[in-house]
Image: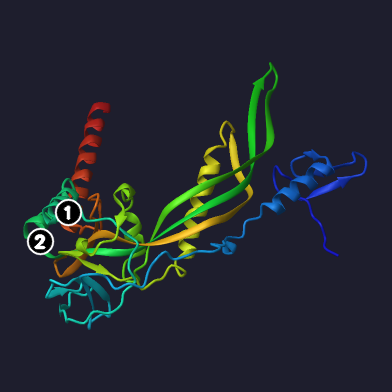
């Protein structure tokens, strides 16, 4: 026989049944509750218990075909093993991951054809402008970084992405409080009212992007979002001209946990945003069920920019559609200590002036 325990909705301490009051009493905060109300509350919690690993993408269909890509060839980098797709006019190129020079053969192998693509909108000049803009106004950047630094490689690459879609049916409950204070001539009073807030609804999610390349840093790819999905169009190999395209090596099934986590986080944030007007709000329980699931295979435009400074390599990623660029810039420790010393001198001067004024 399973033991049943009850906790105080206000402070989570154990509740005890009081025979005299015929109620459940919290010895910690002094609140009293009807037994029927607490049992109903526990039933709600149980029905809304969320199982993170139980997200079911149901009858997910990878809307993709087994056609060969028209006017496209693919090659395997002998150095790092990356499989890259490019147009048939390209005779030689560099692997965007390891810089190995590859002379393309005339062998064409079967490829999974992407469903959709966003073409590049930013050209090489736009990339250079974005790099200069990113470096502008950085006081700790080495003084000669832009002048002496030479771009080692600017590679436009179509990165494979899985675009997930689904409906999320959610039900959430929150513990919330409202606080009222007032005073008399002798006493100050504080009244805290506790509420159980429920939210239910259905959210539609479209084009949840998760990159399908193991060589790409996931955090880096997340950082260059968002893309403008209005420019998403059907795949055509003509868009590959002048660029290369990375074939996915991390399939849709393997990336389901990442997509599910993004759905859960976004849904919870939405439901929480609707609970307003309380002094405090905390999540009590919740569930999210997925239905009408789907996934498409997409190629999205990304520039990989590699630079070298003082023997260290720096890699940046840029959204080839919007121009958003991310990456870590080098720090001049000489300028840092000079800047720190300048602040110290300024503080010392101010303190000296104060001493003269006071004494």
Please tell me in which quadrant of the rendered image residue 96 appears: bottom left
Residue at the far top: name it: 185
Nearest to the eye among marks 1 and 2: give it.
2
Cβ atoms at labels 1 and 2 below 8 Å apart: no
Q: Position of residue 351 (x, y in %)?
A: 25, 36
Query: Which quarter of the figure is the N terminus placed in?
Result: bottom right
The residue where tag 2 is placed is 149
Q: Is residue 94 visible?
A: yes
- 95 relative position to 31: left or right: left
Q: Which residue is mark 1?
A: 141
The quarter of the image holding the C terminus is top left
User: What color scheme is it?
Assistant: rainbow
Q: CA distance from mark 1 to mark 2?
A: 12 Å
Q: Please give the label number shown on residue 236.
A: none
Q: Is residue 22 above or below residue 262?
A: above
- Across and down, in percent, residue 230 comes to 32, 47
Compare residues 263 and 203 and report the one nearer the observer: 203
Identity of the residue drawn at 59% across and 48% down: 170
| Secondary structure beneath label 1 | loop
């Amino acid at each position: 026989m399973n033991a049943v325990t009850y906790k105080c909705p206000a402070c989570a301490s154990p509740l005890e049944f009081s025979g005299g009051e015929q109620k459940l009493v919290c010895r910690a905060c002094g609140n009293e509750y009807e037994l029927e109300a607490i049992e109903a509350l526990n039933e709600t919690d149980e029905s809304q218990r969320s199982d993170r690993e139980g997200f079911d993408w149901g009858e997910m269909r990878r809307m993709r075909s087994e056609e060969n890509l028209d006017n496209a060839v693919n090659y395997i980098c002998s150095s790092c093993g990356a499989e890259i797709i490019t147009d048939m006019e390209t005779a030689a190129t560099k692997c965007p991951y390891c810089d190995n020079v590859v002379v393309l053969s005339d062998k064409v192998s079967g490829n999974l054809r992407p469903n959709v693509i966003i073409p590049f909108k930013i050209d090489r000049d736009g990339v250079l402008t974005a790099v200069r803009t990113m470096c502008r106004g950085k006081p700790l950047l080495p003084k000669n970084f832009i002048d002496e630094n030479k771009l080692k490689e600017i590679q436009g690459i179509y990165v494979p992405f899985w675009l997930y879609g689904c409906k999320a049916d959610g039900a959430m409950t929150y513990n919330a409080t409202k606080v009222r204070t007032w005073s008399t001539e002798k006493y100050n009073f504080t009244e805290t009212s506790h509420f159980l807030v429920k939210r239910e609804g259905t959210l539609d999610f479209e084009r949840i992007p998760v990159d399908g390349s193991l060589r790409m840093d996931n955090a880096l790819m997340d950082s260059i979002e968002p893309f403008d999905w209005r420019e998403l169009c059907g795949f055509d190999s003509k868009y590959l001209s002048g660029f290369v395209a990375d074939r996915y090596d991390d399939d849709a099934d393997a990336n389901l946990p990442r997509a599910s986590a993004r759905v859960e986080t976004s849904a919870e944030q939405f439901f929480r945003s609707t609970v307003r007007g309380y002094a405090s709000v905390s999540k009590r329980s919740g569930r999210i069920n997925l239905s009408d699931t789907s996934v498409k295979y997409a190629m999205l435009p990304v520039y990989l920019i590699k630079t070298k400074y003082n023997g260290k390599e720096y890699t940046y990623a840029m959204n080839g559609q919007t121009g958003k660029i991310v990456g870590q810039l080098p720090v001049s420790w000489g300028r840092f200590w000079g800047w720190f010393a300048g602040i110290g001198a300024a503080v010392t001067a101010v303190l000296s002036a104060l001493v003269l004024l006071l004494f």
